[in-house]
Amino acid sequence: MLATLSRTALLVATTLALASPAYADDQTTTDSTAPKAATGKDDKNAKSLDAVNVVYSTTKTITPVVEIPQSVSVITPDRMSLYGVQGLDEAVRYLAGAVGGSYGADPRSDWILIRGYDPAKFLDGLALPSGSWTADSRIEPYGLERVEVNKGPSSAMYGQLPPGGMIDMTTKRPSLDAPHEIEATVGSFGQKQLSGDTGGQLGSDGQWLWRVVALARKGDSNIEHSKDDRYYFAPSLTWQPNDDTSLTILPRYQRSLSDGVGGFLPSQGTLYYNPNGQIPRDVNPGEPDYDHYYKTDESIGYAFTHRFNDVWSFRQDLRLQNEKVDHRLIGPLGLESDLRTLDRYNYPLVDHANVFAVDNQVEAKFDQGSVQHDVLMGVDYLHSHNDYKSGYGSAPSIDIFDPVYGQPITQVPYTYHTDSLLEQLGAYVQDQITIGKWGIIASGREDWVTNKVTDVIADTKQKQNDNAFSGRLGVNYTTDFGLVPYLAYSHSFKTTVGTTFDGNAYKPITGDQYEGGLKYQTPDGRTLITGAVYQLTQNNSLTVDPEHLFFELQQGQTRTRGAELEANVAVTDHFSMTAAYAYTDAKVTRANDASLNKEVAFVPKQQASVSADYNVHEGVLAGLGFGGGVRFIGEHYGDSFNQFRTGGYTLFDANAHYDLERWRFQVTAANLFDRTYVSTCSSAIWCYYGYPREVTVSARYRW
């Protein structure tokens, strides 16, 4: 550990002048689909164009979406607020190629697939914990400035990542135009929430800026006898002594408390017929007085930026993060022969993750005759420690149609305990080249990864060292009328933390993608349409171990071929629309078990959505707005053997809002008609109902 800290200190010290991957030149947080003020002024809308059409995470430079030879989508706070988003899996509902909520409503985690794969999650450009349970913990959406969804391999800039894509979330930070607001929300299942966001400058010279974002929520989940409480607090402070230098301190605290988790219900009574009837979707199969899920997420970091001149600039982002999940649950194990008595198990666990991450960058912008270069060189380091222990035992059965809780629960000892340490050191270089109407992005990166796994109970140790090169090459051409065709290739790898049931460490997962597409943006920037076709191949894929509960196997190779279309269109100053469509053909093309050469689980071949928002700017009804959306998810399998297929479903969302001077009053409804549907079944004993109708009513005051 001392050697590790020494290397870390040396790395930080030698790159102290490097700057932040924050949006230093783009602090806007609004959305082109958000309503204008009742005055009809265009200043807010002008800012929103940059927020939607400019991204950072794909290239680690501020680059217009239309110039990037890769599929990328942006979600802003106004878009999330418009639909009452409570989690990241809800935020991606209207994106092509992204599927959220496969396991239904779950207050613990965000379950998301991008192009058929679990995406990596980053916060402020730095990796989040990747432990057994800490990897799936939720980040509070209210604390986010924006969300960028990058589809396809991104290892060339970030190192070890899954091939499907990554999600980079940016926290709210000080800004001269930061809002001053307080909002009260009530909603379905007894939800009561109070949130606030305010900031400004200290003094009058603009050198010191501050911001405080806070949220407190009390309420139940959609499962009986279960709660979903959250607390979030994120103060931040920026010092900018001049236009060329900035330092932002970013502390953050998040606490989540819940009980039963729902789902995990038998297929007979959910997906299939049961003579006893349909199992209620709000039934709690666990033990309300025993189950709990406590998560604490604390972090502190900074973003430093310094520009030496018009050519050279430096950036550094650094974060220390501590996350702990304390969870125990009584889970279902299937029905007995009477098809109503539910057998159950007892599963306690504790997962504790500590992560230190730093990313150092130097950027140079210069011309060579008619050729413009934007060169980025960087070194990053990740130190991720994960301590995970769990137990497994039996629990009393219950009648799932008439559950009676309170039977004695025998405490289960921890019988599985691993201590994992992952270290990653990466060096990368990228050149964004412009030659007339041609654009080229070439990225290359070398990573050195060490993964140590200790079985604490068996007192055995395993160590694997991996080094890998990741690359990306993309080319586009900007036509005179704004259409931009592009072609791209990218490669990824990911060192997988963990072991099989036999104790063997997982091999790195690698991926290769070929993508071609078209992008079109109107001259005013208010309409952006993108389309892409791709082939994505992954090797050493993970799948559920059919013989050992809670373990996975590496099955071989999967291949995904797909087509995607996304459109964000400002039809008029009053009316805007979004539309998305994705065709995804995901198959296992090589498996250790031939019976697994099937369609990839959880991935629908067809998905589509459309949403609209209309706002009144003049007249008696000025300030009124309303909208809605329709989402379709096609049929898909939920298990590796393709035995459990759930049908497609269509859901409707709606919202209405009214702006009166400094107030906004809003009503949102997701799954408006409260359709009951099974989102997926991963086995005969584990099926999951999808999100029920969720209604929120809020009042927001800004000053």
Image (tube, rainbow, N blue to C red):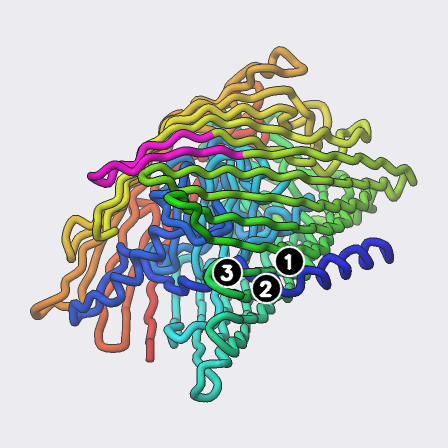
Where is residue 277 shown, x and y percent of the image?
45, 32
| In the image: residue 601, left or right of residue 333 | left
Question: Which amino acid, mark 3?
Answer: Ala
Q: In percent of the image, x 29 and y 43: which residue is there?
A: 652
Q: Nearer the viewer, residue 286 or 45?
A: 45
The answer to the question of whether label 2 and label 1 lie on touching residues, with beta carbons closer than 8 A, is yes
Q: Looking at the rendering, in which quadrant would you find the N terminus?
A: bottom right
The rendered magenta stretch, by its main secondary structure, is classed as strand
Where is residue 80 shown, x and y percent of the image?
38, 56
Q: Which mark is residue 295?
A: 1
Between marks 2 and 3, how big is the CA–CA gap?
21 Å
Pointer 2: what residue? 254
Badge 2: few (under 14), some or many (20 or more) residues near its Cα, within 10 Å? Answer: many
Q: In percent of the image, x 41 and y 33: which residue is there?
A: 475
The answer to the question of whether label 2 and label 3 lie on touching residues, with beta carbons closer than 8 A, is no
Where is residue 666 shown, x and y percent of the image?
29, 64
- Which mark sits nearer the N-terminus, 3 or 1? 3
**Number of callouts:** 3
Q: Can see residue 595?
A: yes
